[in-house]
Image: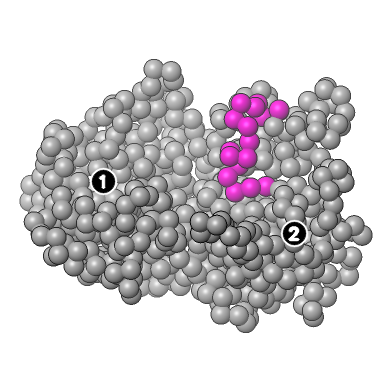
Amino acid sequence: MGADAHIAGNSLPFLRVCGLTKHYVRRSGIARKRIPIAAVRGIDFEIATGKTLALVGSSGSGKSTVARCVSRLERPDAGQIWVGDTDISRLGNHDLRSCRSEIQMIFQDAVTSMNPRFSAAQIIEEPLLIQGRGSKEDRRTRAQEIMSEVGLAPNSADRSVMEFSGGQRQRLAIARALALQPKLLVLDEALSGLDLSTEAQITNLLLDLQAAHSLTYLFISHDMALVAHLADAIAVISAGRIIEQGPTAQVISSPNHPETKALMAAANAFQKNYADVLGGSR
Amino acid sequence: MASVFNDDLVQIIDLTISYSLPCSAPVRAVDHASLEIHRGEVIGVLGESGSGKSTLAAALLRLLPPYALESGSVMFRGRNLPTMTELELRTVRGKEISLISQDPALSVNPVIRVGDQISEVVRAHLAMNGSKRRQHVEELLRAVGFDLPRQIYSAYPHQLSGGQRQRVGIAQAIACRPVLVIADEPTSKLDASLQAEILALLCEIRKRDGTAFLVISHDPTIFPGLADRIVIMYAGQVVEEGKTADIFRRPLHPYTQALVRLSERYFASVPGSHARFPAINGEAPDLTRIEGGCRFEPRCPERMQVCTNCDPRELTPEPFRRVSCFKYGS
């Protein structure tokens, strides 16, 4: 695919997904017959180290399935997921354990992805514990380091998850994802549902972290306006297939596919109304 | 006051609502808020989580929990809602004031066909026989954009998509031609492209029926083209109010200024620029620990000595405008 060469740029891609396909099974009727439903089919994309690819689509388009396959919360039915020179698409649980520290996922609703009985420090330490990293003291120190890096007061380490506000919980989710020093973050609608000022703060945090650690982001969203701002490349997904992809400026300025145009129109609606309102009354 | 009654639908005067639970300190969710809604007008209430915007809606619908303490008045067409009995309120809710909720999936009964749920509202308030009612509901479904209202009528909520469910929620809200519809975050659970459709539908209803809307949102970008006036709330207080064009053209309060800058950010940015957003630092205050002074002061880029100690008074720097900030006098 010609567009892929663009996205890769000069450096070797960090992540390369080829022909990713995932079916879910629905059971129907009295015989509970298995009916396979293709969630995504033949997905191809790649992301260079330290870059951001935005996967954009409306609800039900399959974007979360791609996220879950890339972070190997789901096992794809076909296709490869290359991280460097390893194909992680077929790895079993044992081999996955080491690859999990390279790829971490951040979910839309931070609080449902956390144990409500845990303290902030326990949340961040858990991945370290599972991977058997450091002593108890090391883990606590690391947790406090990360907390200050994501903008949480280290002295709130013993507070329960439930005592944090929505924005702070999203920071906590980022802290947990960073604990293992991953190279790729899969952000599944990580900014949707946040207040405008919180969204801006978290976006800035993600940009800072990316610059500091040359993190690679797979950014899943339906908000074209936000994506236009922080992605290097955009892939548009519809009904389980990628219908358009390319560098951000190109996709934004000359969208080809009707679906992309619809997403752009939605993003531009405010701009249009805003101009009308400002121009209208005086 | 009496002279404008026929034009005034709602007058909220000096409303204060505190939630007081035995296990925690009382939270003053709404603090001396005043607000007017005129007939056929669309008012936007802009505020972030914890600003008291949903409590304000609950006060209008009289859906406050029993542990809420309230002072001030909520006048609706000359009647003070807080003094009305539950029986009297039944003739108001659904008939004169109705609600479009954020997530219609949570506000509908999953085992009743959506048409029958809308029909229930009609039966409670309007004298119509069965077939007339069914016809009325099908007309409503058509009016909210369904081409095949008969099929939607007999669908169960889970068979509809999020956008379709929100349309059903709107049909239910306008079923008895209310004079005021409260829309609490009507689009925040929807995709960007569906958002625009739902907002256009609200505009259409307002134009056709002359219904007044109180639209509550944390997202300023939905208001241009929808709202006539915007009220901005921060930490339970109304900090600014003005016509939509004025708010976006010349925001006065530093908090409003920051929000307008943030909503403009998209079309100012170069694609893929990775530029940082002009964020507001810090967090909204903890409402259980409010002391004196302006509540935005800790986050305000233009704070002065006076802001720490004194509460800003509400000023009217120009007609149809109010703001609570020491920048404009005290």
Residue at 49% from the left image edge and 33% from the top image edge:
B285
Residue at 75% from the left image edge and 61% from the top image edge:
A77
Q: Is residue B241 above or below residue A248?
A: above
**Amino acid type shown at disc 2:** Pro
Name, please, the residue furthest toward the front. A31
Residue A121 highlighted magenta (yes or no): yes
Snapshot quadrant of residue A83:
bottom right
Q: Quadrant of the C terminus of chain B?
A: top left
**Kind of element beneath mark 2:** loop
Counting from the top left corner in percent of width and height, residue A209 is at: 75, 48
Residues at marks 1 and 2 on the same chain: no
Counting from the top left corner in percent of width and height, residue A265 is at: 51, 74
For the magenta stretch, what is the residue range? A106-122
Name, please, the residue furthest toward the right. A85
Q: Is residue B198 above or below residue B239?
A: below
**Residue B51 visible in this rendered orientation of the protein:** yes
Q: Which mark is residue A76?
A: 2
What is the chain identity of the residue bearing mark 2?
Answer: A
**Amino acid type shown at disc 1:** Leu
Q: Which mark is residue B35?
A: 1
Q: Which mark is residue A3?
A: none
Front-most of residues A168 and A243: A243
Residue at 72% from the left image edge and 39% from the top image edge:
A175
Q: Horizontal placement of A127 versus B132: left or right?
A: right
Residue B294 highlighted magenta (yes or no): no
Counting from the top left corner in percent of width and height, residue A197 is at: 54, 48
